[in-house]
Image (spheres, rainbow, N blue to C red):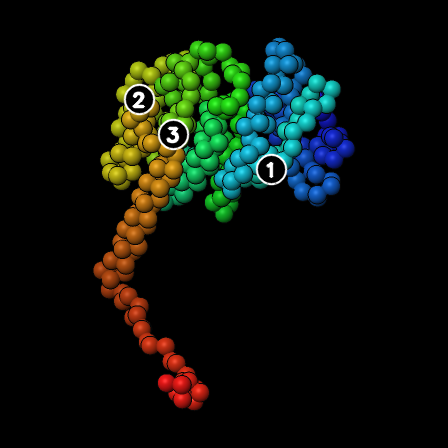
Amino acid sequence: MKLVEGQLIHRRYRLDSRLAQGGMGEVWKGYDIQLGRPVAIKALRGDLGVTQEAKLLRLRAEAHNSANLAHPNIAALFEYYEHDGIGFLIMEYVPSKSLADLYHEQNGPMDPIKLLPILIQTARGLFVAHSHGVIHRDVKPANIMVSDSGEVKITDFGVSYSTNQEQITQDGMVVGTAQYISPEQAQGKHATPQSDIYSLGVVAYEGLCGHRPFTGATPVDIAAAHVNNPVPPLPDTVDVQLREFVMSMLAKDPLDRPKDALVVSRTLSRIERRLLDQQTQLADTMVVSSGGRLPRRVVSKPHISVSNDWKEQG
């Protein structure tokens, strides 16, 4: 079955435009004619060499893993159904740029004041997923959507793993994107919440440096570097506490990384508040040193009107 523009799916969802094609499926921007809202529709491709049943198993797993992840920082799953051997995921449409797009536009290090809120929200979403036993396994800038107002949505649980589902990938199979993969995933070991934390650490490193920690001629070379090579230090221009914490997220041993994604979000939030305070103090100092005057702070007691009835009661 070939999907075409204008086609009606499930008597309800209209295909408007193809957004992406690759991996095991294609993604369309669609429209829910019953509720009158845009949606994203992920469907299987019919021209892949693997068996149809194997593809459906993966799509069912993605639907299963996304079903209970109701959180503002995770793109919502609305519905899953199958027709003529083709599976369809109906999801929240996120009309935003990805963090990968923002990195490309920035073409260099991003201001930590702008980057930290994105990392904090992503960590919050990951903590909810981990709390439900779901490991994303492919945390990367392309799967982190950022709206113009700064709201973050984690997308694409296509290779996610749930602790209460049957194993789909074989033991020793590497799952993830080489540039952001954790050392244990690169070695074909089971992913854990700390694996997602490592990948988010790579995302943070890239934002603070303007480049990823490891490069190579092939994905295999890059994955091997995650396993064997020490992480190059972050620039001294990066706040020391932020620098040390991101490096802890990138520890080779999962046990040396932060305990969970909630610790990541809370720690980064504290760093963000301190950097904002420092920025405010610096701005005030610059005003004074340039001969300007800070606005005078006026404090007055509130006027209380005392009624006769209240006086008599007193």
Residue 197 circle label: 3
Question: In which quadrant of the rendered image does the C terminus lie?
Answer: bottom left
Q: Distance between the residues labelled 2 and 3?
A: 12 Å
Horizontal arrangement in the rendering, residue 19 relative to residue 201 (left or right):
right
Question: In terms of sequence position, does the residue under pointer 1 or pointer 2 come before the other?
Answer: 1
The residue carrying mark 1 is: 92
The residue drawn where x is 24% and y is 38% is 240
Residue drawn at x 42%, y 18% is 190
Q: Is residue 294 left or right of residue 118?
A: left
Query: Mark 1 or mark 3, which has the lower sequence index?
Result: 1
Which residue is depicted at the point 73% across and 40% down?
Answer: 33
Question: Regarding mark 3 in the picture, which secondary structure is present there?
Answer: helix
Is label 2 in contact with label 3 (beta carbons under 8 Å)? Answer: no
Q: In which quarter of the image is the N terminus?
A: top right
The three-letter code of the residue at mark 3 reads Ile
**Amino acid found under the numbered disc labelled 2:** Asp
3D distance between C-alphas at marks 1 and 3: 25 Å
| Horizontal and vertical percent position of residue 2 | 72, 21
> Is 195 in front, or is 162?
162
Can you identify the residue that label 2 sits on? 253
* Labelled disc at residue 118: none
Q: Can residue 22 be seen in this view?
A: no
Q: Residue at 51% across / 45% down in the picture?
A: 148
Element under disc 2: loop
**Image: 117 above or below 158:** below
Check contact, mark 1 vs mark 3: CB within 8 A. Answer: no
Q: Where is residue 249 in the image (x, y as percent from the top left)?
A: 33, 30
In the depicted view, which residue is nearer to us: 135 or 1? 135
Amino acid type of the residue tagged 1 in the rendering:
Glu
Total labels drawn: 3
Question: Label 1, label 2: how many angstroms apart (C-alpha)?
Answer: 36 Å
